[in-house]
Amino acid sequence: MDSILFIIAAVAAIGCGLNLVLQSHPISSALSLIGVMSSLALLYLLLGAEFIAMAQMIVYGGAVMVLFIFVIMLLNAGAEKRSDKSLFARIFGFPLLAVFVVPLSFLIKTTFSAQVSDVSFGSWVGGTAEAVGKQLFTKFLLPFEVISVLILIAILGAVVLAQKEID
Amino acid sequence: MSFFIIVTLVKIAIVFGVFMTTLAYLQWVERKVLAHIQSRTGPLRVGPHGLLQPLADVFKLLTKEDLMPPHASKFFYLLAPFIAVSLALVSISIIPFGPVVDVPFFPGHKTPLGITDLNVGILFILAIGAISVYGIALAGWSSNNKYSLMGGLRSSAQMISYELPFTLVIISPLLLANELSFRGIVNSQADYYLNFIPRWSIFQMPFPQIFGFIIFMIAGFAETNRIPFDLPEAENELVAGFHTEYSSMKFACFFMAEYANMVTIACVATVLFLGGWHPLFPAPYSDWVPTAVFLGASFLLFAQGNKIGRKGDHITFPLFGLAALVLAGVFAVPMLQTYIVPIFWFAAKAGFLLFVYIWIRGTLPRFRYDQLMHFAWTFLFPCALINLLLTALMVALFPNQK
């Protein structure tokens, strides 16, 4: 049961990821990205991190992607044309991909095979909102606050840029 | 294990049936109430008092021609109503309608009234709300129609803006309850102050959430695109907004999604602020309230039947009165009271909120678009923030008052 659920979510994530790159229309790509986010949320949920899963859906699946789609709709972007011009990509694309992927998978297999153990879904229950909150406000208090200041700076920057446009 | 699955399937069947019937008849109620607010009679022709009108509407929508605009992008055009309606129907699954009760005919087994309970319940509702924007946005974009596109854009902007006060104001009752699961939130609102003031969130010390409740309802109106926030479908500017190009069952999907969202918001407000299934009075009296209400209704209906009214009222009013009398009898059976009295209180609160929805639709005009945004960002958002800060401060200062 565990592996079936994992395979469904993982295949959905990879399929949506491929679709994201292969689609020529920006809206299709954005929707595929939402598919990737949702499948990731499903994987988090299977691992027992229910709070992270819901936060993933609210923040990435909801707020961020709505903004993406909003911008695409406002610009009324049409389908992109395939150029099919790059000789370099056509000849060296797949060989380079193989050169990159094969050593990487080999490295992952050799480095982590000692630490890998079977995961059974539902065995770990440290993903509740309470546990995450406790970690954020004790162990990770400094990074948490620093990130909030960083985001504040980003918001200020956005406001300044927007004001210049109006003047 | 298999017993759990069977009980859950039965509960799903019951909830689905009741929910769909509610959606169909909510529309009849809305038309009737609106009509009476405007001194009209509303639907009357199909069945007594137009009671079969929802059925007639379904047949009308099913048999209408299913148009497909020639330049629409087909896949997304078909996907949008599907997203809208399926997401709108999912949220009801985690609403608790009553306490944990014994399963009838199977002694020794207990089950909660309500399909399921998540320990991140409220976040689940927010996640579903965040995703359901895509239904409307995609419908507007894929129709390839400027009115639809404007409607879709307006609705996305409105939903993003109002999600902020909506989310902020939800946090305050969570601070009081110290819980994220709906069942836990309702359980934390049991009991009474001085034996008569219920400990619902809107009355709960150390900081009553009465303002929070009002902000929640306003933001809820905007999230469901209802008057006075129904700019995505403002008919004098945008024909019908995002569903201009939709007909037949696809239009019905959007219609159903809107009503399902209304019911969900009313249920969530009941759970978060109005104490869920907990009665207004302490238990010894409140068990007899439903009986009294239905008895009163039946007497009123019998009295109305004697007056000179429209043709047929002499038959229909006493029949409705008889039905109310039977309901009063059902609610008086002590064996059934443990099951149906909590559900009565939940339905009464949610039903009242739904009535407020319709009432406001009959009362208020529509916002202008800049007023809408101004209201959200410069009034509602700071109010929600102040409400949250005050609640947090009071909970921190008086932790034992809870």
Image (spheres, coloured by chain):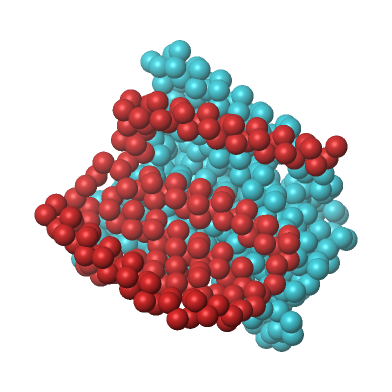
Q: Residue B243, percent across and down? A: 72, 69
Residue at the image point whose x is 21% and y is 65% from the top: A106
Q: In this view of the protein, can residue B130 be seen by the observer? A: no
Q: Is residue B66 above or below residue B294?
A: below
Residue at the image point whose x is 27% and y is 69% from the top: A102
Q: Is residue B211 above or below residue B158?
A: above
Q: Residue A78, percent across and down? A: 70, 72
* Farthest-out residue, top: B397
Q: Residue B278, percent across and down? A: 45, 37
User: Hey, which quadrant is residue B349 in on the image?
Assistant: top right
Residue at the image point whose x is 26% and y is 41% from the top: A126
For this rendering, which residue is in front, B102 or A166?
A: A166
Q: Is residue A98 left or right of residue B75?
A: left
Q: Is residue B260 left or right of residue B95?
A: right
For this rendering, which residue is in front, B183 or B356?
A: B183
For this rendering, which residue is in front, B332 or B348?
A: B348
Give the drawing colour for chain A.
Answer: red
Q: In this view of the protein, can residue A91 be seen by the observer? A: yes
Q: Is residue B167 left or right of residue A123?
A: right
Residue at the image point whose x is 44% and y is 60% from the top: A38
Q: Is residue B73 above or below residue B177?
A: below
Q: Residue A55, percent across and down? A: 44, 46
Give the drawing colour for chain B.
Answer: cyan
* Farthest-out residue, right: B236
For this rendering, which residue is in front, B115 or A14?
A: A14
Q: Is residue A115 above or below residue A99?
A: above
Q: Quadrant of the C terminus of chain A?
A: top right
